Image (cartoon, grey):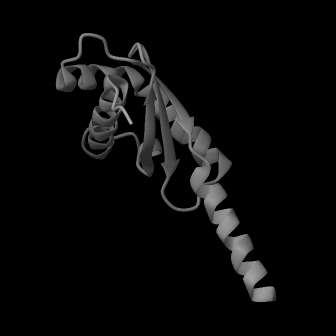
Amino acid sequence: MEYKRADRVADLLRREMADLLLRRIKDPRVSKVTITAIEVTDDLQNAKVFFCLMGAATEEEKRSAALGLNRGKGFMRLELGKRLHLRYLPQLSFHYDSSFEYGDKIERLLKELHKNE
């Protein structure tokens, strides 16, 4: 399988964004945010940033985290531009990653099914 430039940029973005969230962004709404994946288009113009929250999260916490991430988007792009030295930095869009919740739900159902046997 070919490792495209978009994949390499996505890996770099994920690493640097995780560092930014940990060290530079002080917004309490994003304190529990973990970047799970980033998908960058082949033309490197757009990036979908998938995130989840550590621990059990309510719908309000998810909305609040998304709002906090969107609010800090300009600062993140500025910092990423300084760190990555790319000619064009992709536009960031944030999306909640519900795959962990789905996996947890499946695991609970399987345990319940196994317990009932």
On the image, the x and y values in percent for residue 42 come to 42, 18
Q: Is residue 14 left or right of residue 34?
A: left
The residue sitting at 37% across, 20% down in the picture is: 74
Q: Position of residue 111 (x, y in %)?
A: 69, 79
Where residue 98 sits: x, y (%)? 61, 48
From what the image shows, is residue 96 above or below residue 71?
A: below
Image position, residue 18 (x, y; %): 32, 42
Between 42 and 48, the residue placed more toward the observer is 42
User: Which residue is painted at 52% across and 62% down in the image?
Assistant: 55
* In this view, 7 is above or below 41: below
Nearer the observer, 57 or 6: 6
Quadrant holding the C terminus: bottom right
- Reply above or below: 56 against 72: below
Q: Is residue 87 above or below residue 48?
A: above
Q: Residue at x 40, y 28 (%)?
A: 72
Looking at the rendered structure, the number of numbered marks drawn on it comes to: 0
> Along the horizontal axis of the image, is 1 left or right of 108?
left
Name the one closer to the observer, 21 or 38: 38
- Look at the image and tell me in which quarter the N terminus lies: top left
Q: Give the residue at the far front of this rendering.
A: 1
Residue 25 in which image quadrant: top left
Q: Residue furthest right?
A: 116
